[in-house]
Image (cartoon, grey):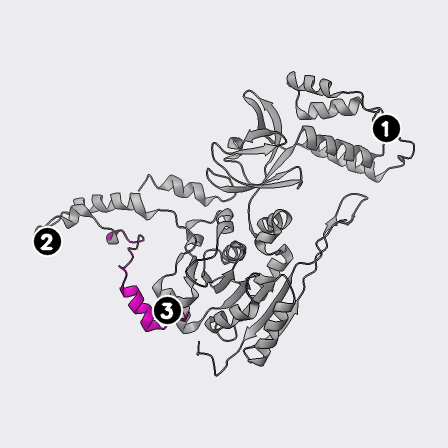
Amino acid sequence: MSTIKPEEDANQNRRITWDGCSVLLDINDGDRLVFSRLTSGSIVKIGNKNYPLQPLIGCPFGSLFQVENGINGPCLSRVISTAEANNTEEKRECGIKDESRDNRALVDNNTAQTLTGEDIEGLRRQGASGNEIVEALIANSATFENKTAFSQEKYRLKKQKKYAPKVLLRRPFARSICDTYFKKYPARIGFLRVDTLSLLLSFANVTAQSDVLVVDMIGGLITGAVAERLGGTGYVCNTYRGDSPYSLEIVRMFNFGDEINRRIVRLPLAQLSASQTEVSKENGQHQPAISFDDPSNQPDASISSIPSSQPVSMEENTVSNTETVVSKVYKAAKPGEKAPEDVIKSWKENGFSSLIIAAPDVDAWSIVKEVLPFLAFSAPFVIYHQYLQPLATCMHNLQVEKMAIGLQITEPWLREYQVLPSRTHPHMQMSASGGYVLSGTKIYNDNQPNK
């Protein structure tokens, strides 16, 4: 048993990275976002060079790293903020606020910088750090002193991103993952924006001990966000049509522990709609699964080979069970396993506490009329779609069939601001639309089975 405790302790503190965890690398303050899995051999490419990620293992999330020249070549070195650096930042901010100069007399003719590319390469061969190269560029600029404080800071930041890039170690969670995918691969998550994701969780009333039914066709982002909010309580059931479940690749980026992974289950619609008799017959054709939570359920060849008439000593039994526990009981749980039979039976009798649908490739009404009967009466449901018309059709059909009340279609709106001294304003480029959300509450109908 003692050999298992270090592994448990290593995964208890989720604020510090460990070997094999997923991280989000924020390069140069959002210029580039990269998902990576920390291992001894993993690397990240910045510019035209590869940097090992070994120094990031064991560091807390939120740590800042900078490219430096190490003994074995370029590497990532952790940057610790000091009081002197903070004072320097405050002085720069004060300089920007008390600005009286302007840039009207400056002419951009590419002759202000006297340091050539060969000179910069020479500094690199001599072992100069990125910050030293930036200071050399500033010292050899003929127009730097005549610029405004804002222009000086902009120039410094531009050169720092090129010659001394910084990497921020971020923890992947629902908001950061959604933001990153929306910026890089929006089609993979159905163009779901982070404010729309928050609306889905709020309208569905996802709270502790909830049993949430999810139709997630956007890579598992909804499933992971629900599981993160449940925090290891209740269940999130990912249902699907046919025999091929939908992908849950995004869920693996959340670094969930075994307790939360066990609460993420899959179940086909055919099994949910089957009668209890058919389910029991279907389960009878398979051998019962062995529970690894109880060491007494483990098959033991040494005990089973002993005749029943021969007594078994307590010491031998204890040693055998201990060996079995060490090898199997702490096996990592994977998200998306089959739901326990007693839980399925409870869902059939009582229904789910909420329903979330994010299926942009399927007609909204066709999927709603299949999964809504599994929802408990007076339970909320919410449907996301990139376009308005499928949700409007679905809303009309729900009203005609008298299946729900409180129906409303919401279009979220988000404006992001840049907040800096003397230059606070909305961002110049914003997302035009975050999709649409149809929400409502299921009611009793004579044509529906009683939940």
Question: Does the magenta portion include 250?
Answer: no
Relative side of 204 to 90, left or right: left
Q: Amino acid at mark 1?
A: Asn
* Label 1: element kind: loop
10 Å crowding of disc 1: few (<14), some (14-19), many (20+): few
Relative side of 346 to 177, left or right: left
* Label 3: element kind: helix
In the rendered image, residue 302, in percent from the top left (x then y), is placed at: 16, 45
Residue under label 1, please give it: 109
Q: Which residues are magenta?
A: 273-296
Residue under label 3, please give it: 345
Which residue of the protein is positioned furthest toward the right in this rendering? 105
Q: Which is nearer the eye, 80 or 36? A: 36
Question: Toward which corner of the image does residue 119 lie, by quadrant?
Answer: top right
Residue 84 can be seen in this image: no
Question: Toward which corner of the image does residue 98 lie, by quadrant?
Answer: top right
Q: Residue at x 63, y 31 (%)?
A: 47
For the residues marked 1 and 2, what is the alpha-carbon distance in whole angstroms?
96 Å
